[in-house]
Image: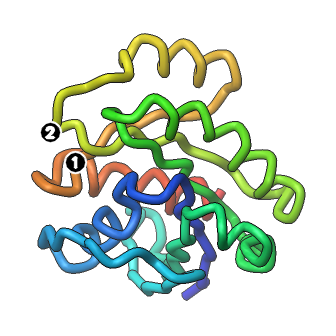
Amino acid sequence: MPVLKVVVAGDGGVGKTSLIRRYCTGKFQESRIMTIGVDFQIQVVDLGDRTVKLSIWDIAGQERFGSFRASFYRGARAVALVYDVTDPISLRNLPLWQAEIAKVAPQARFVVVGNKIDLERKVPREKVEAWVREIGLPYLETSALTGEGVQAFFTTLARLAAA
């Protein structure tokens, strides 16, 4: 069974760790402890025509970890750029994340993920959809709290990695 490296990236506090935990355990566990550097999870995914093993890399979003993040991106097949729909700055920073990752993993395929859709939105969905159409990336929305969209998100990430 092939092992495919995927990266979940974005600003600190957007819910990356909570999304991964929801996907891997089926439960919401509010994470008040920030990720230091990187965390890993392994998950077997059935894509219908084949089964793959995802090596999910949860990358710390805080700026102070920026100097050594690049080494974590190497070999990534797919990358989720996650932002918080209640935080416009987290969306504005996604092109910076994409550029940082593409330098080290030029073969990586990207998906944009809007998280925390269970909360009051401050980023209009139409604005994001127009932007992702312009740059040609898939877009999904999720709630780690309710689980909405989480399975579809990781299936999409696995399909991108397996392509």
Marks counted in the figure total 2
Q: Which residue is drawn at 49% across and 84% down?
A: 39
Q: Which residue is drawn at 39% across and 73% down?
A: 45
Q: Mark 2 highlights which residue?
A: 118
Q: Which residue is drawn at 33% across and 78% down?
A: 33
Residue 93 image offset from top left, x and y in percent: 62, 39
**Residue 148 appears left or right of 2:** left
Instruction: Give the image quarter of residue 86.
Output: top left
**Is residue 14 placed above or below 64 in the rendered structure?**
above
SS type, badge 1:
loop
Residue 114 image offset from top left, x and y in percent: 39, 38
**Residue 77 appears left or right of 34:** right
Query: Which corner quadrant holds the C terminus?
Result: bottom right
Residue 47 image offset from top left, x and y in percent: 42, 63
**Is residue 96 placed above or below 120 in the rendered structure?**
below
Query: Could you tell which of marks 2 and 1 lies nearer the N-terminus?
Result: 2
Q: Which amino acid does label 2 sit on?
A: Asp
Q: Which disc, if any, is residue 143?
A: 1
Categorize mark 2 by other alpha carbons within 10 Å: few (<14), some (14-19), many (20+): some
Q: Which of 89 and 76 is in front in this view?
A: 89
Instruction: Give the image quarter of residue 59.
Output: bottom right
Residue 29 image offset from top left, x and y in percent: 16, 73
Question: Colour mode?
Answer: rainbow
Q: Residue at x 82, y 53 (%)?
A: 102
**Is residue 80 placed above or below 59 in the rendered structure?**
above
Determine whether label 2 and label 1 are within 8 Å by CB.
yes
